[in-house]
Image (spheres, coloured by chain):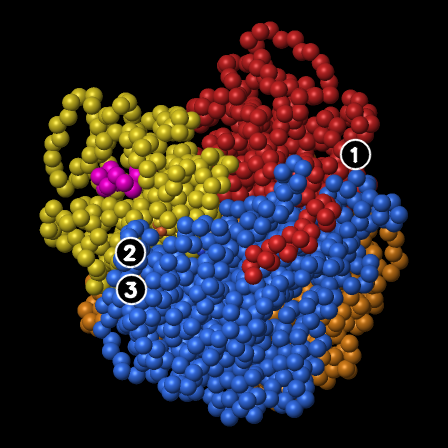
Chain colours: A blue, B red, C orange, D yellow
């Protein structure tokens, strides 16, 4: 796989002795895109999960449909760590295009299962090797040439199953899951796996220490992608209008929603649907439809990625200025521009928060887990309607498109919060209505919806200057009052977005702040640091604007590290602007390669800075005079 | 304060000529259909369109609260503030009225969407959205107030400016015009018409026909900009439009609620029954023309183009085309206020979904 | 005029005594938009200028073509101050729509010249009033009803000319300027002015102290709008491709350029032009054309305002990521959204600097004067080609659309700097070329242009991942290296953008930072503060990124005020992010009403904060814990 | 490293069938016209178009450095990396190739611009830019690699998907297709053609004709997506295209540098002399058709639409339309490297300007 060439002083060493390593290693499989290897990898992943062992899967795939290199990593972790690890102990080399560079990059002591029918020129004598003639085997296992490629992939599953001691019955269960009830496919694949197992049994001598053993840590757990989780959240959140324009890595969010709604949002009597899902012609149109629908009272959403966020800029400013609700899921990928469309980053944080010209600020919800993706998707609709604002839900490719283990999602207990909407009856009772008056002192005005027959109800929405009565104005004080109300509304949101999650440690001098998917590597890094005698406290941001707990946490810890996955410290910028008194306090740990973050990166960076050392390459563009 | 132009009741006296009858079929006075005082230049064609809209909605007897007025940015896009002051309105961003309108009708399919745009708003920056809205057949009366220039930014050519038309400063436009009617027909639009802001009668009949239509009804209305495009050499001036306006037919309209039999000489008039039962009567003038024949409409517009004729009339009608809400198989009730039980599946559904991922 | 309702404790008092006030007052004229009053105001402005007296003119106009209220202010200042003043001593009320509110807003002791043919209901006894029956007079002065409106406006010029003692000969000169050589128009207007003078002479008794007297402070000065100045700069800077989409307040920049190029960029032999100016269909297209042209080697530019900046987001990120040059003039108006399109602000500063998704940063040049608008327009083309980047020139409506006195612009002395472009001969000599290699260690690579016939020349430009050879890559280290080079390039720019202008004061404990048009009120405020015994030092920012002088200046002064014309402190954000050690040091003085900034606002805000007082309404949304 | 696909020399062996002759008229081998190895799915229609481009530019004898390749985003938009590896290229953002192309040719009018786009890139997000480029007649060969879906994002319908066409998952498209050829003709495009990626001969002839044209030459090429839109029920599959392809005529091309007299039966062939002196020969097949008659071309496409015919051929040519650089009256030399004396007026001019503001 493509390695990060940053020096790795403390790279984990794989055990070269025969002492068994149980349920604590990573497997990486190199294949080509579009070769069907995804099913094999999923079967492997699920089989281990079903044995009660915590697993996670990460797919590193190209921006291409077929033929380019892909790496899938399965982490098996008895302790439940699910971040990427820098080194994978077991490597399965199935792609001729990368076999040489893949093998070159392996760490001494690694296990290498490789397709000996491929042209390989790199020799190593510090690996534990298992050559397997996969092409030949698949000829034997599968007479039908059309299916042979797929079968090859299942044969390597068999070899791995044998070497690691995975239970074959769990493979069968996983296959049933994968291929639903298509018995023919199940049989074909199961046979291929068994073929691989048999061959390995007869031909390979186990030389490595890695094994799986049944545990009971995954009972009742689901395995799901964050995009699907968010889609289920939207479904349960009562979305009624969803517009989109396809873009990796957000497409599968809406495509999941489409599938869900086809099943679960049909009127039982008429067969008609209670949700409008529209593939727009572009992102300018999709956000426009979201706002038109939000204005007219729907729970409306779109999902996109960086380029779409840029295209939505103008409309999002209109929503800010005119108090129009809507939900935008930004599944972040690597920018700028097209960047690396199939790689992960946290590169839109500052951009979404300040999107559009003029003075604008937008709230963000930032899930770290699939469960939060599910939960925040619902919360976003409530918040959008409550505060009459665009709400960003900031996922990333790692969360959105990788498989994550989780407890099943809880059924929502709260009713839908539809915000300050005045009905005809309300207006009858109140006898007056001014669209943009801050009646409650929280910066959030009341609204009516089009179609309300009360004569007081209709008002005119515009992106140009307007007074409290929604009338056109260019009067300086009207403008300033409006801008001040909007700023006040933003203050109100501090305690409406999800509060941070804090893990205090009274002994800790070091505080770590992270957010989104950086969480998982951070959790693991903290355990490693603790083991090294460095206790840390931890605050995980889950929303913007920040509440007062954030300042308290920063204040409390003499040294403060901020982990993020972008170059410019976008969250650091938001924190510094909000709490300038701490602007010099942040010590950046920034990962920006497109790969998912690993604990070693955090530990190494943090320890280097603790020693007063350099920040590596990140230093010279870091804040000046710091 | 003067810079705060009122956009709400009490509405000003109607700008239209005194109404013949005091109340419409709903018992509402004309004042219920007027809006704020126009801030456009006096004589602007857009104000005449405003008046025709007021009159048509009054005559047809639409409850104002059922209407949503949508627009982009431009002098034309300001006009929704000047009619139907008792309807909600959304003056959005430049060129993006179609998206806002689409979202609004999906949220609430009971709304009668009236979209107002300019030629710059539609044919320049907004061309993509315009065409995709037409392709979807989003239910909306789409009015282009077409003056061939950007009025609000002071008179630059728009994409509907004719080849050879001269600007006020005397510069000549080199490029062929976008013909929004031809484009709409090409995309399958099921109601395509052109009028001239100087022809109040024709406009009113067209607006009523559009109200009786389901789906996107495109009305491209030549509407002279008196300040920047009303000079000699302009092909969008009052004089030019008056001199070159060739009505294709005389448009009569019998609303569904007036069960009137209309007598006409056989062959003289083409009758089209609209979706709501209203009837559009097209009385032949110079040529035989069947507005339900798409190929004919395409040929007609191409001929008009080569002959530089300003044809007005209803070019194409197809009262049967399914609109976007039908294509999407939406429930009959507006989506926006469905109760929670209808938009949040019950617990067993979540359990079933969760099971699928175990 | 629309007044700022913020409490004005120290509002300037107009002298009510008869002691003459010479060359030091403001005149404000209220008319309706599209009534032709602009010519009258210009004639008034020019006549005073030609008498050697420093003047400035500011137009407060509606977003409308005809009929809405407009206020034009002429400031006459023997000391050369040209910022807006909070109070105008002389008010000319010509607009029935606003006459009552206008008069209500006047300060006691003000002079009121008003059209007594209008319906006025507000009575005041604390003003010096001159009622003039303008409608009647224009009937008499002008038999042709079509011209009468225009003539009315010239009649009020006559009245003012008489009252202030303006020389009629200068009016004639000004009229000739205004109407070029159209003798008929000159005569008509001159007669109207004379008619007004005569009538005033016969009917008015001078009761106020305000007078003009010839000075010699304006000899050789020009009076010009910033947009025109920038257009002349672009002309002299050798622009070859200009694309645009009309938007207030930027349109007149390109329209001036069109006029200039029609005259001055024609090939003398063929009559063909050496510049392509294209009105695009929107801003997405105009920026795309700029980048296509910049990529192909042209000096390319566009001009726009906030909404256009938002629409250009995606493309500007591409330019950042792929090193493509281009110049964007952002003539800032009041946002968010459509906002107040005919009012001024500095609301796009942070937005332009960080435009687009992902980690992006863009350089900005920020002129304060028409001369800088001229100069920076040229510099922008040099810088864009030198650093292969989009360069923003941040004007605002105040600078762009108001008339400013200035020395004539100097003819450029430097040759055009076309940056690191390799020709066929260069490639012959070098024998190798890699498009994105940082050969010089400044982060700026070399480029070739399409059409270069050398076989090494062609390369492929893309917004997706690319290595130093411009090849497609998804390799993590390639991505990080590219992002680091771009960050380094940005560092290089610190000393390539215009350096700040510093006015040191060794006695000053207070430092003031301002930029753009805030300069003029700041200059005046500093003089007032000095007179009040409060010396201040001053740094005027003219470019982003900042050079080291900025940190030094901030460091040197115990108390630091930052003047800007937006709500959220957008420049403060950029300074705080760049120099976090000073993040708590900035004391904001933020004006955001759409009106131009005045010195009193600065003085009052600064003094209140010096006293430890509240920051007025700006406080509660200011930085937390500050 | 495998994830770094080489985009520069040394170019890979040609993907096209072995050349008949070794060198073209410039003495260059075919390898000078190839690019990197394609990373598209094997069998993708786009690769066939790539091959036809390579062959046409080789045969015509264009110096590769004179070409600028421009594209948007999509599988189709990747292809400029796979042909003419010795030409500069710019793979821009989604749907905005036209703007980049326009800027590039204005900067350097000597460049031969080849724009590649997809149906999503052109007819969905890029519709406005496409139409405005056509309206301006920017000199550029505009290739739409039309597969009716978004390939790169995995198979969603694009706006050229036919009404009634089914997705791989079996969902049916409800909306009428955008016909980019009909739209282009409507806007006055002076070279409009459609082909099928399975017809190499027709494509090559068309590309050569396009090279001989001045202004925007639109080539809408049906190019099946084997991965997402090649199934039963799709109207953009290989099978459907093969079964329904109706060539309008057989296209011959005589380049200006080959002074060959071509014999044909009178009435059998329509000859069009192109701007550079090359001749396009259109040999009649089933119907008489004059591609210089705009009205006829409009009727033809409308009929093809109603009959669901996949007509291929050159629908419209007008070799005389002035292109955008001419409309702008640009000097003959490319603007980008005019010397400073020609782009910076001398001091007296600045003095004169300054005087005007005194
Ligand atoms: C994104 C954006 N670009 C530019 C503008 C400036 N602008 C306002 S109205 C307008 C053109 C209006 O022309 P048209 O739609 O024909 O309306 P008209 O004023 O002629 O009725 C433009 C370019 C804007 N508001 N927003
Ligand atoms: C602004 C933006 N939105 C969405 C995308 C995602 N995207 C990439 S390619 C593509 C569609 C490509 O379809 P098409 O142009 O038909 O090309 P094909 O892949 O079919 O050849 C989309 C939507 C993007 N790159 N940029
Ligand atoms: S500028 Fe033109 S379009 Fe605008 S209001 Fe005036 S006349 Fe009408
Ligand atoms: S996905 Fe379709 S369009 Fe893309 S390369 Fe594969 S076959 Fe071609
Ligand atoms: Mg217009
Ligand atoms: Mg496609």
Of residue C415 and residue B206, the one placed in the foreground of this image is B206
Please, which chain is the residue tagged with disc 2 on? Answer: D
Q: Which residue is mark 1?
A: B32
As drawn, B196 above or below C109: above
Please, which chain is the residue tagged with disc 3 on? Answer: A
Using the image, tell me which numbered label, if any, was put on residue D38: 2
Res C597 → quadrant: bottom right
Q: CA distance from mark 3 to mark 1?
A: 80 Å
**Left or right of residue C205, residue A3 in this image:** left
Of residue C237 and residue C612, the one placed in the foreground of this image is C612
Q: Is residue C33 magenta?
A: no
- Crowding near the residue tagged with mark 2, few <14, some 14–19, many ≥20 C-alpha atoms within 10 Å: many
Res A120 → quadrant: bottom left
Q: Nearer the viewer, mark 3 or mark 2?
A: 3
Residue contact between numbered discs 3 and 2, judged by CB atoms under 8 Å: no
Give the position of the C terminus of chain B as an image quadrant.
bottom right
- Dot 3: element: helix
Is the residue marked 2 within 8 Å of ligand 4, measured from its CB? no
- Crowding near the residue tagged with mark 3, few <14, some 14–19, many ≥20 C-alpha atoms within 10 Å: many
Visible residue check, residue A596: yes
What's the residue at 49%, 41% (across, down)? D171
What's the residue at 59%, 16% (across, down)? B271
- Dot 2: element: loop
**Left or right of residue A173, residue C527 in this image:** right
* Residue B356: image location, x then y, percent: 56, 56
Q: Which residue is mark 3?
A: A134
- Dot 1: element: helix
Report whether mark 1 lies on the same chain as mark 2: no
What span is colored magenta in the figure?
D192-205
């Amino acid at each position: 796989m493509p390695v990060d060439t940053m020096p790795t002083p403390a790279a984990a060493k794989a055990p070269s002795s025969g002492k068994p390593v149980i349920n604590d290693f990573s497997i990486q499989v190199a294949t080509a895109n579009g070769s069907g290897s995804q099913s094999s990898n999923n079967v492997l992943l699920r089989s281990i999960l079903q044995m009660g062992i915590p697993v996670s899967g990460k797919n590193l795939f190209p921006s291409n449909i077929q033929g380019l290199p892909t790496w899938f990593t399965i982490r098996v972790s008895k302790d439940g760590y699910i971040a990427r690890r820098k080194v994978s102990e077991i490597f399965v080399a199935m792609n001729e295009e990368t076999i040489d560079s893949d093998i070159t990059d392996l760490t001494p002591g690694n296990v290498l299962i490789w397709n000996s029918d491929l042209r390989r020129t790199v020799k190593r004598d510090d690996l534990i090797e298992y050559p397997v003639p996969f092409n030949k085997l698949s000829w034997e296992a599968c007479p039908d040439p059309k299916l042979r490629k797929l079968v090859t992939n299942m044969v390597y599953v068999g070899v791995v199953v044998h070497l690691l001691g995975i239970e074959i019955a769990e493979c069968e269960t996983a296959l049933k899951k994968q291929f639903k009830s298509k018995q023919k496919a199940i049989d074909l694949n199961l046979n291929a796996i068994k073929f691989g197992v048999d061959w390995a049994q007869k031909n390979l001598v186990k030389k490595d220490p890695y094994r799986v053993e049944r545990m009971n840590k995954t009972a009742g757990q689901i395995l799901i992608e964050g995009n699907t989780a968010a889609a289920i959240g939207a479904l349960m959140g009562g979305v009624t209008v969803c517009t989109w324009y396809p873009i990796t890595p957000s497409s599968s969010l809406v495509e999941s929603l489409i599938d869900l709604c086809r099943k679960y949002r049909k009127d039982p009597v008429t067969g008609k649907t209670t949700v409008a899902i529209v593939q727009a012609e572009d992102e300018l149109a999709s956000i426009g439809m979201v706002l038109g629908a939000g204005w007219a009272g729907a729970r409306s959403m779109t999902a996109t990625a960086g380029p779409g966020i840029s295209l939505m800029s103008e409309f999002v400013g209109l929503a800010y200025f005119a108090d129009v609700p809507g939900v935008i899921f930004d599944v972040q990928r690597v920018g700028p521009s097209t960047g690396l469309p199939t790689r992960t980053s946290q590169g839109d944080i500052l951009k979404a928060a300040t999107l559009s010209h003029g003075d604008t600020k937008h709230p963000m919800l930032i899930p770290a887990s699939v469960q939060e993706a599910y939960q925040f998707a619902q919360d976003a609709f409530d918040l959008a309607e409550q505060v009459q604002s665009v709400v960003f839900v900031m996922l990333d490719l790692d969360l959105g498109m990788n498989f994550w283990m989780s407890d099943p999602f809880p059924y929502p207990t709260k009713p839908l919060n539809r915000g300050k909407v005045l009905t005809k009856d309300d207006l009858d009772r109140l006898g007056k209505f001014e669209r943009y008056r801050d009646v409650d002192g929280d910066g959030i005005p009341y609204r009516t919806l089009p179609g309300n027959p009360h004569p007081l109800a209709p008002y005119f929405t515009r992106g140009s200057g307007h007074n409290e009565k929604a009338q056109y104005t260019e009067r300086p004080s009207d403008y300033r009052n409006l801008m001040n109300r909007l700023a006040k509304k933003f203050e109100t949101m501090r305690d409406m977005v999800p509060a941070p999650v804090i893990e205090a440690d009274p002994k800790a001098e070091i505080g770590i702040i992270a957010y989104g998917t950086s969480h998982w590597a951070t959790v693991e890094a903290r355990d490693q640091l603790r083991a090294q005698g460095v206790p840390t406290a931890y605050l995980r941001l889950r929303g913007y604007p920040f509440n007062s707990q954030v300042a308290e946490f920063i204040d409390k810890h003499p040294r403060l590290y901020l982990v993020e996955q972008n170059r410019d410290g976008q969250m650091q910028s938001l924190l510094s602007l909000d709490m300038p008194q701490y602007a010099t306090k942040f010590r950046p740990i920034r990962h920006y390669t497109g790969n998912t973050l690993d604990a070693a990166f955090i530990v190494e960076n943090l320890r280097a800075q603790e020693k007063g050392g350099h920040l590596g390459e990140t230093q010279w563009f870091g804040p000046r005079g710091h | 304060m003067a810079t705060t132009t009122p956009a709400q009741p009490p509405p000003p006296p109607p700008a239209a000529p005194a109404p013949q009858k005091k109340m419409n079929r709903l018992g509402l006075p004309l004042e219920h259909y007027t809006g704020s005082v126009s801030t456009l230049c006096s004589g602007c064609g857009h104000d005449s369109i405003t008046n025709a809209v007021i009159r048509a909605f009054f005559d047809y007897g639409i409850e104002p609260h059922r209407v949503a007025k949508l627009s982009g940015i431009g002098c034309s896009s300001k006009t929704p503030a000047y009619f139907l002051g008792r309807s909600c309105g959304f003056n959005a961003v430049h060129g993006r009225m179609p998206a806002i309108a689409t979202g609004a009708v999906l949220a609430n399919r009971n709304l009668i969407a009236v979209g107002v745009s300019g030629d710059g708003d539609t044919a320049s920056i907004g061309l993509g959205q315009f065409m995709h809205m037409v392709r979807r057949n989003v239910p909306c009366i789409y009015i282009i107030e077409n003056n061939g220039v950007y009025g609000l930014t002071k008179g630059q050519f728009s994409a509907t400016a004719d080849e050879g038309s001269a600007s006020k400063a005397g510069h000549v436009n080199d490029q062929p015009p976008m013909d929004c009617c031809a484009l709409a027909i090409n995309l399958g639009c099921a109601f395509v018409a052109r009028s001239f802001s100087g022809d109040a009668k024709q406009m009113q009949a067209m607006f009523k026909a559009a109200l009786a239509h389901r789906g996107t009804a495109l009305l491209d209305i030549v509407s002279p900009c008196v300040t920047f495009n009303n000079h000699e050499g302009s092909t969008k001036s009052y004089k030019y439009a008056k001199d070159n306006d060739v009505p294709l037919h005389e448009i009569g309209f019998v609303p569904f609620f007036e069960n009137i039999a209309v007598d006409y000489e056989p062959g003289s008039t083409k009758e089209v029954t609209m979706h709501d039962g209203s009837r559009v009567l097209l009385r032949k003038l110079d040529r035989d023309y069947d507005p339900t024949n798409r190929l004919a409409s395409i040929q007609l517009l191409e001929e008009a183009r080569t002959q530089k004729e300003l044809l007005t009339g209803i070019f194409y009608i197809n009262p049967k085309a399914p609109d976007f809400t039908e294509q999407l198989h939406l429930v009959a009730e507006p989506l926006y206020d469905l109760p929670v039980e209808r938009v949040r599946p019950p617990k067993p559904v979540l359990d079933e979904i969760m099971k699928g991922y175990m």
